[in-house]
Image (spheres, rainbow, N blue to C red):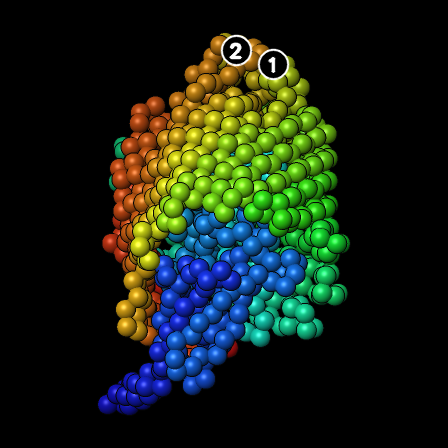
Amino acid sequence: MKQLVPITIMCLTSVMAMGQDQTLTGQVLDVAGRPVVGATVLEKGTNNGTGTDGSGRFTLRARSQSPTLVISSIGFAPQEVSGGAGPISVRLAESTTSLDAVQVVGSRSQNRSVTDSPSPVDIIDIREVTAKTGQLDVNQLLQFVAPSFNSNRQTGSDGADHVDPASLRGLGPDQTLVLVNGKRQHQSALVNLFGSRGRGNTGTDLNVIPAASIQRIEILRDGAAAQYGSDAIAGVINIVLKNSVDELTVSANYGAYDAKYRFDNETFDGGNFNVNANYGIGVGSKGGFVNATLDYNKREHTQRADVPSSADGIARRQYGDPEVSNAAAYLNAKFPLSDKAHIYTFGGMNKRKGDAYAWTRFPDDDRNVPAIYPNGFDPIITSDIIDGSAVVGARVMVGEWDLDLSNNFGSNRFEYGLRNTLNATLGESSPTTFDAGGFQLQQNVVGLSATRNYKTVLQGFNLAAGAEYRREWYSLFAGEEASYRNYAPGSDIAGGSQGFPGYQPSDVIKANRDNIGVYVDAELNVTQRWLLAAALRYENYSDFGSTLNYKGATRYNLTEFLTLRGTFSTGFRAPSLAQINFNSTFTNFIEGQAVEVLLARNNSAVTQKLGIPSLKQETSTNASVGLTSRIGSSLSLTLDGYYIKIKDRVVLTSQFSNDDPVIGADLQALNVGQAQFFANAASTSSLGLDAVLSHSLILTGSRLNSTLAANFNRLRIDRVTTSGRLAGREDEFFGPREQAFVKASAPPSKINLTFDYQLGRFGALLRFVRFAEIELIGYDDNPQVYKPRTTTDLSLSYALTDHLQLSVGSSNLFDVYPNRFDPQLTETGGAWDPVQMGSNGRFYFAKLQARF
């Protein structure tokens, strides 16, 4: 009875609140009177919002007595209007000055909308996504929202356990360029060496930017090196930070996995807690602002090691996601100087600590000291990652030209540690914790751009030009002596810390390089229906020379409801400083047996002796053709086919053993069991199709948005190139196993079907994601086929008050796992490699969000 009283009060409060609701209707048009499709309509100071349908109309049940609506759309200046008794009519116009205009990635023309773009661009409203889904970090958010984007957490993969590799269209993590507010984001210092994803690649750590600080994410699914420079072979991800003012958003989230395949009786594991706050204040009377975000995320271990195995048993007693704590602070600000000039700055700091289990050393392992660990031990690789960035710039109108001068600095430092481990050559006197060293990457970019729009040239001509100077630094530093030294060199016992041997003084290096790039970018509206665009970019690198790339694009409106578009471009990716300079001796496991492996830097005496040439740029050709169609007032379709050919891809070669008939003697002299290298060894081609079908249904007081999005992708390895003393040994230089990892960077298809329903204060989201079959090759050289899988996500939300919303739900509702394999034969030592939806199973979550 006592419990019934508060429940009754809550119900009465909810009924009274709903009784105060009023239904607002309206239409959003542009200055020419055309409907603005997909505009965002928000009730200011609440979590309440909706979008416009195919005719620009909206219906929203307001929660306050005197509601104010904030209406915005990419390519237009936002407007605030007061809700009234009758229909609301809003006309979104261009800003009074081009300094306030919006620019979408893929075009340097101000106020170019997504549907006007000759290249396919996805716009993801993070506010909508984070409120209704169980994923908390950017990588996992995009993994289940954007079919062309793929990212999986890895385990037993050293540094890749702490930095999730991600890719577009099945290409490498380093073949996607990441921008923040249109400025180049620095990469992670980590080069991925293990795991089944991103091997031999560097990439950008998207998770250093808290989702709470992001307004939207733009994904350009097209080659864009001629527009933005190196790394944009697969496309560009542009993260746009929040600029809202006079609004406080606070969110608390918690979720956990349905525990399975554990050695104990735990019901849940992998607890994930996140709390964040975002607030913005206005500065001056000319649109200035300061928007700040604080974010903390704590993710615990999952355990999935108790699986059926062969007679050899399991390879690891601890298998699952690492434990990670992540704290971040981000800022986005604009300070007007006049109507024609302002200063801007943005950036932030992120500090991450992680614990990841390495492979088990069982009691009878010669790398164990029974006096210290009588039951064997599970080494824990720790990470201490500090990532920071700061951008400051000024924009000013000089005549008709919009000038932008900026400086962008970014740094990523990764330090390894070990605990619950030992150096077996020290015997019982060995410490159990070690500092293993690490690496750091820094980048500074100075950029100047100029943009002008000529409205009287045909139907409009936009010209942009600019120059960038980029300097990069890379350093690798050694760990403490006991982390790498062998104190019993005459024995067969391997030295160094078990799980991850520290970097040695011979690995230490400091390297840098300079890059100068200049570009010109033009768009011409020949008629109201026909757009032509072209870009040309020249870059010169201090370490390998120069490159010239171009891009041409067109868009033609056949009818009011059907548009054709196409692009053709060349591209390039400069090998990262980490790929050129990384050097290490580490322990790998082949069929459960430990082997010392040398990964020799590209310009070392070892690689030169073996005839491995210096790394050079990757080059690409990218072509796409597509159509966009609006069928009726509420149904839209986009289809984009693409072809990407890449020559001289930088890959991590297969491992050569010390009994090799050609180079075995050299490896024996180095006391190394196996060796591998970075080389421009592969040329690939990708043929694919992106499809997005969207439907919006507006009923009295409710809205149902349905989306079917799919990516179909086939990647082929056309040629393997060998050189030096290893010439003619293609199947050994970059063999079938390594080729399978490249091909499995993404499923051949990923299909996403989403239903998003809103009725007053109640909302529901139902999502199905189908991952196609993936094939890897095990250590026994036999195929490991992961059959297609479909996951189901369901979330329910309810606005408890005008300012407070609760969401609960489940990701992977039916607890789907990939196929299992013998842990002795997989890359990660568990029953699954990191493919498809991952191997953690069902996830439950609850979110409470307050907005004032």
- On the image, the x and y values in percent for residue 331 come to 63, 62
Q: Which residue corresponds to mark 2?
A: 727
What is the quadrant of the N terminus in the image?
A: bottom left
Q: Which residue corresponds to mark 1?
A: 611
| Element assignment for label 1 | loop
Q: Earlier in the sequence, mark 2 or mark 1?
A: 1
Question: Relative to 513, does residue 709 appear above or below in the rendering?
Answer: below
Question: Relative to 301, does residue 807 appear above or below in the rendering?
Answer: below
Identify the amino acid type marked 1: Gly
- Within-10-Å neighbours for mark 1: few <14, some 14–19, many 20+: some
Q: Specify whether residue 265 is in view.
A: no
- On the image, the x and y values in percent for residue 111 come to 56, 54
In the image, what residue occupies the spot 50% across and 38% down? 554
- Tell me which corner region of the image, top left, top right, bottom left or bottom right, holds residue 523: top right
- Tell me which corner region of the image, top left, top right, bottom left or bottom right, holds residue 827: top left
Q: Are marks 2 and 1 in contact (CB under 8 Å)?
A: yes
In the image, what residue occupies the spot 75% across and 54% down? 399
- On the image, the x and y values in percent for residue 425 come to 56, 34
Count every numbered label the image shows and give the total.
2
Out of 790 and 658, give the one closest to the viewer.
Answer: 790
| Measured Cα–Cα span from mark 2 to mark 1 | 9 Å
- Within-10-Å neighbours for mark 2: few <14, some 14–19, many 20+: few
Please indicate whether residue 793 sits to the left or right of residue 598 in the image: left
Which numbered circle lies on residue 7? none
In the image, what residue occupies the spot 42% across and 74% down? 88
- On the image, the x and y values in percent for residue 533 come to 56, 39
Out of 480 and 764, give the one closest to the viewer.
Answer: 764
| Element assignment for label 2 | loop
In the image, what residue occupies the spot 44% across and 59% down? 34
Identify the amino acid type marked 2: Ala
